[in-house]
Image (spheres, rainbow, N blue to C red):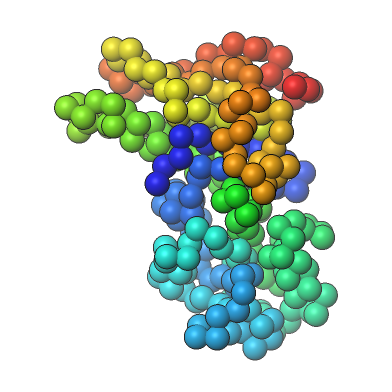
Amino acid sequence: MRSNLVYVYVEKVSHLTLTYGISTADFIANVPLPPKNILSLSNVDPQQEIDIYSGFNMYLGEEAVKAYLSGRHAKALEWIDFDSVNDLEFLAPREVSELLYLGHAYTHLKAPFYYKLQNSYVFLTLPNGAKKVYYRYLPHFYQLLAKTLAVYLAEVYREKRLILRSRHPFLMMPSEIVQELTSLFSNGVVFDYGRVKIRNQEISIPMLTAPESVYQLKWHEPTMLIEKSKLVGKLHYYLNVKEWKLEVIVPEAFEDNFNF
C-alpha cells in the first residue's frame, strides 16, 4: 500500500539511503539492476536452502529472488546480493560476522561492498518499516526514486479523479530534476502525498525538509516527520504537456551546506 509520505535521506560517502514509503515491491519493480542471488540476513529458515559456508539462507536466480522478495514476509527483510554461489566459500569468518552485525544492528562496521561477493546492494528494514539500503551505484537509487515518485503521483491522481483515471499516462521524473534535489537528500526530505493539490492540468507535491531522520526515529511512527518539517519547495506535474517542474521556495535548502 502506498504511504501518504515518502521520506528520503542519502549519505553519499557510504552510499547509504534511508527511505520511508518506498516498499520492497517498489524496489523490485523499479531498480535498474535486479539482484540475481541473495543471502538473507534475517533469522535462518531451516525449510529453505542454507549456504553451508556462511550459515545464511540463500536464494539463487532472479526468479527465486523475486519470489522471495515478493512473499508475505517481504515487509521486513534484510539481505545482501552476490554474484556467484562459488564465491561464498571464500568468505572469511570476520566477513560473516560483519554480515551478522548488519542484519542485527541495521548499520555497517565497514563499507558493506565486498570484493568476494561483488554485491550491488545491502537491504535492511528498520523496526518502523523504513528501508535502509546501500547502493554500490547511487544513480541506481536515483532512477528508482524518479520512477517511484511518478507512480505514486499517478495513483494519487487516479484516486482523486476516478472518471479521468485512464486518460493520463505519467512520465518518469527527469534526471535533471532529481539532480537538483540531491542537496535536499543530504538533510532529509519529505514528499507529502497527503497534501497533493490538483488544479486543472497541474498537480503539485509539497516537499519538506525534516529536522530529524527516520533513523533517529526508527522505533517511532515516521509520520511525526510532517509535524516538525518545513516547506522548502514543490514538485509540479503538468498533464497537458507531460512535464515536471521544480518550484524552489527556500533557496538555501537546496544548498549543500544548509542546516535546518
Depicted 190 relative to depicted 96: above or below: above
At 29% from the left edge and 32% from the top edge, which residue is drawn? 159
> From this viewpoint, is residue 136 visible?
yes
Task: Locate residue 100, reporting x and y percent.
Answer: 73, 71
Task: Locate residue 163, reporting x and y percent.
Answer: 17, 27
Residue 253 relative to residue 199: left or right: right
Query: Which residue is nearer to you in this view: 66 or 105?
Result: 105
Residue 180 relative to residue 234: left or right: right
Depicted 128 relative to depicted 227: above or below: below
Task: Locate residue 245, reporting x and y percent.
Answer: 46, 18
Q: Which quarter of the image is occupied by the C terminus?
A: top right
| Res. 223 image quadrant | top right
| Res. 92 image quadrant | bottom right
At 77% from the left edge and 58% from the top edge, which residue is drawn? 108
Q: Residue furthest left?
A: 163
Query: Which residue is nearer to you in this view: 49 or 63?
Result: 49
Residue 157 relative to residue 1: left or right: left
Depicted 150 relative to depicted 34: above or below: above
> From this viewpoint, is residue 66 visible?
no
At 71% from the left edge and 33% from the top edge, which residue is drawn? 212
Task: Locate residue 77, reporting x and y percent.
Answer: 56, 63
